[in-house]
Image (spheres, rainbow, N blue to C red):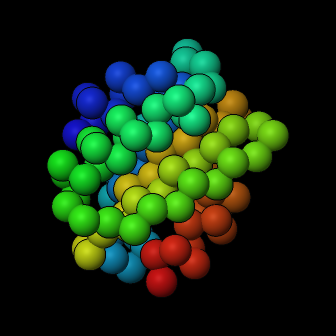
Amino acid sequence: MIERLTQIAGYRGYGLLNEHGAYLEGSYNHDLGSALGKSIFELQRIVEDTIGNFNELVVRGKKGAIFIARGHHRTCFTHTLKSTNYGLIRKIIAPVVQ
């Protein structure tokens, strides 16, 4: 899944959380631009192949977007934020995980 996520145009980082919202893994890529809106369908397909059926939420703002996919035991998110503020990302994701 990770290799496929990193090929998406606009990808800047991803994270994988367990059912309690604890951070399992993730990464950040400084080199890519921001075009997640064009890649949502591709992202949905990759996540669905990995975690099965999921609920999705896309949060867009002036500085980027976050795509959150919540499965039964895992939550996957990816974002295009130019400066990563994981405190803010966790604040956005916390209500979705619970």
Q: Which of the two residues, 34 or 87, is positioned nearer the viewer here?
A: 34
For the point 52% across and 74% down, the residue is 96
Q: Quadrant of residue 33?
A: top right
In the rendering, at what x and y percent does residue 13 appear? 49, 37
Left or right, 78 with reference to 84: left
In the image, residue 50 above or below residue 55: above
In the image, residue 72 above or below residue 52: below
For the point 27% across and 42% down, the residue is 46
In the image, residue 82 above or below residue 90: above
In the rendering, at what x and y percent does residue 52 appear? 20, 61
Q: Which of the two residues, 66 or 20, is positioned nearer the viewer here?
A: 66
In the rendering, at what x and y percent does residue 1 appear? 23, 40
Q: Quadrant of residue 7?
A: top left
For the question of whether residue 12 can be seen, the reply is: no
In the image, residue 78 above or below residue 73: above
Q: Residue furthest top?
A: 31
Left or right, 59 with reference to 93: right
